[in-house]
Image (tube, rainbow, N blue to C red):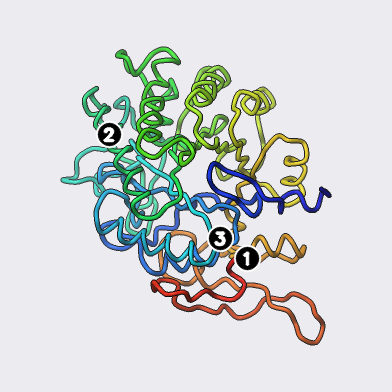
Amino acid sequence: MSHSETIFAPYRLGDLELPNRMVMAPLTRNRAGVGGVPTPLMAEYYAQRASAGLIVAEASQISAEGQGYTGTPGIYTEAQIAGWELVTHAVHTCGGRIFLQLWHVGRISHVSLQVGRQPPVAPSAIKADAQTYVDGEFTNVSQPRALDANEIRQIVDAYAVAAKNALWAGFDGVEVHAANGYLIDQFLHDGSNKRTDEYGGSIENRTRFLTEVMKAVIEAAGADCVGVRISPDSTVNDVHDSDASALFNHVVSMLDELKPVYLHVIEGQTGGPRNIDPAFDFSALRKRFQGAYIANNDYDLALANASLDRGTADLIAFGRDFISNPDLVERFRMNAPLNAIDTATLYGGGAKGYTDYPTLVTDSSTGAAVNGENDRGDYTSHGEQVFEGQGN
């Protein structure tokens, strides 16, 4: 296999045959409807990107309490399940494969988003130095309250129900969101977890919540349909640990014993450049996990192929490039220029900056690949309409 072909090689992920090694990372876009219900516009958005080897759909709260931002989808009501069914049908009609990321934000929330304006929940009553997105603007998060042990077990159960709901909605699997300073990550780090019960203190205790969630989700969906995402070297949303290397070596060893189908790792600071702490050994994590390893954070085509060639990753996740390039796979294949991203339309709004990015067409006079007009159509009907070039 030549270097240029590496990322386009097929890959077997559990029961799925991926046509390439490119993963569309979960990307919060705040386009869900009232009640966290996915919309036909969201179905169109994901279907446009179905040429990815795997899509991991945006983080979706497992309960009303788990919401932290305006306009994010859920996976706990019948209406939400029905909305997601439109999305999965659209993606599958276009030949794609799609997982759903399961999410509980914990303390990264605001009272205005909580039922009855109750405080958000967390492992400990420590307010994060962080912001969330409420009604079109960023605002400081609210003071949380600490969960009791019975509530923790109820949240574990909610993850299992959400996994079943996702499969019912037609997803090929689920990804447990244990990264980016949200609830599971808050339990892992000793800067945000000051508990003195069986969920706090030692690394083993702080890992207990993640372990219980993973066991419950795997029991509900099957290991071949469950992935997990971590961000070992990131301090986003105000998470810190006194010994992150020891913590995540233990986390990954535990995950390897449970055998989820993949481990999705953000290398460096979430959403930032690849300024990886040289003291943190990501290769050690890779060696500890025997399943598929998805590498994430600021990869371009050259870096992706180099990582795949070396065997330091099996799959590469791309985020913002997939936002502005629905045909990113084809653009990489043709070494075509990428569309610039419109940062003003990342969060909230409608089709602008969401489903209107142009795809490549061939110039009849020169044979060159150029941007064409965005051809929007109906991805949401349960017929067989597929836009030209969107299938695999």
- Vertically, is 233 above or below 323? above
Name the disc covering residue 157, or none.
2
Q: Residue at x 39, y 55 (%)?
A: 170
Labels 2 & 3 near each other (Cβ < 8 A)? no
First in residue order: circle 2 vs circle 1? 2
In space, the residues marked 2 and 1 are separated at their CA atoms by 38 Å
Mark drawn on residue 327: 1
Q: Are marks 1 and 3 in contact (CB under 8 Å)?
A: no
Question: Mark 3 — residue?
Answer: 323
Dot 1, how many residues are within 10 Å of its Cα: few (below 14), some (14-19), or many (20+)? Answer: many
Q: Identify the residue at image location x=24%, y=49%.
A: 112
Label 2, label 3: how many angstroms apart (C-alpha)? 33 Å
Q: Nearer the viewer, mark 2 or mark 3?
A: 2
Foreground tag (2 vs 1)? 2
The label number, if any, that marks residue 88 in the structure image: none
Of labels 1 and 3, the one closer to you: 1
Mark 2, residues whose alpha carbon is within 10 Å: few (<14), some, or many (≥20)?
Answer: some
Find residue 284 and report its horizontal and vertical position in percent. 65, 23
Looking at the image, which residue is at 38% across and 64% down?
86
Badge 1 amino acid = Asp
Residue under the point 53% across and 53% down:
55
Farthest-out residue, left: 116
